[in-house]
Amino acid sequence: MDQAPAAGGAYIGVIARQTAAGKYFARAWLRPDGAIWLVVHREGTVLLTQAVPGMTWAANTSYSLKVSVTGTTSTAISAKLWATGAAEPANWQINATDATPLAAGAVGLSGNRSGSATAPLGVTFDSFRVTAPL
């Protein structure tokens, strides 16, 4: 990300599962005050939010986001975020469930700037990898 938090918030992350019936997102919410929250939602319905303790965002900083989506009768969506180059957190930082799950489907990348942002945001994605659960 090439802008400082004062220019406005943003949502950056992944489309974790997408079908004709909808999609799950797991995203980092980069707030204008510099705080970082993880947000899991299904289309416009937020399933869970969680502040990432001890992290603030800054311009020209790189982060790693890992997401897991499992289940067919109930879907579990978990995520964790850390500064690239730092140790990956041992535990998931957010764990959401959806009792009416979407079937397995496509995945992708997602990003948008909040409506109150005062400048465009440049974001670069690198090393996007999808693996099947063991």
Image: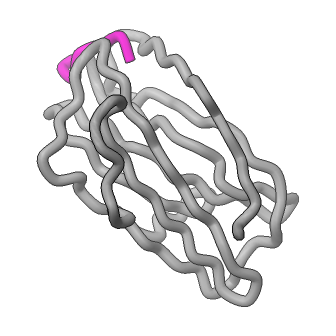
Instruction: Depth check: give the residue in front, 20 or 56.
Output: 56
Instruction: Depth check: give the residue in front, 55 or 118.
Output: 55
Q: Is 17 left, or right, of 39 in this rendering?
A: right
Report the predominant secondary structure element of the magenta stretch.
Answer: loop
Residue at 46 percent of width and 43 percent of height = 65
In the figure, residue 119 lies in which quadrant? Answer: top left
Residue 80 in the image: above or below residue 101: above
Q: Which quarter of the rendered picture does the N terminus lie within?
A: top left
Residue at 77 percent of width and 55 percent of height = 18
Q: Is 72 left, or right, of 120 in this rendering?
A: right
Residue 51 in the image: state x and y as whole percent.
23, 56
Residue 71 in the image: state x and y as whole percent.
69, 80
In the figure, residue 84 lies in which quadrant? Answer: top left
Part of the protein shown in magenta: 1-6
Residue at 14 percent of width and 34 percent of height = 33
Residue 11 in the image: state x and y as whole percent.
44, 37
Instruction: Depth check: give the residue in front, 57 or 118.
Output: 57
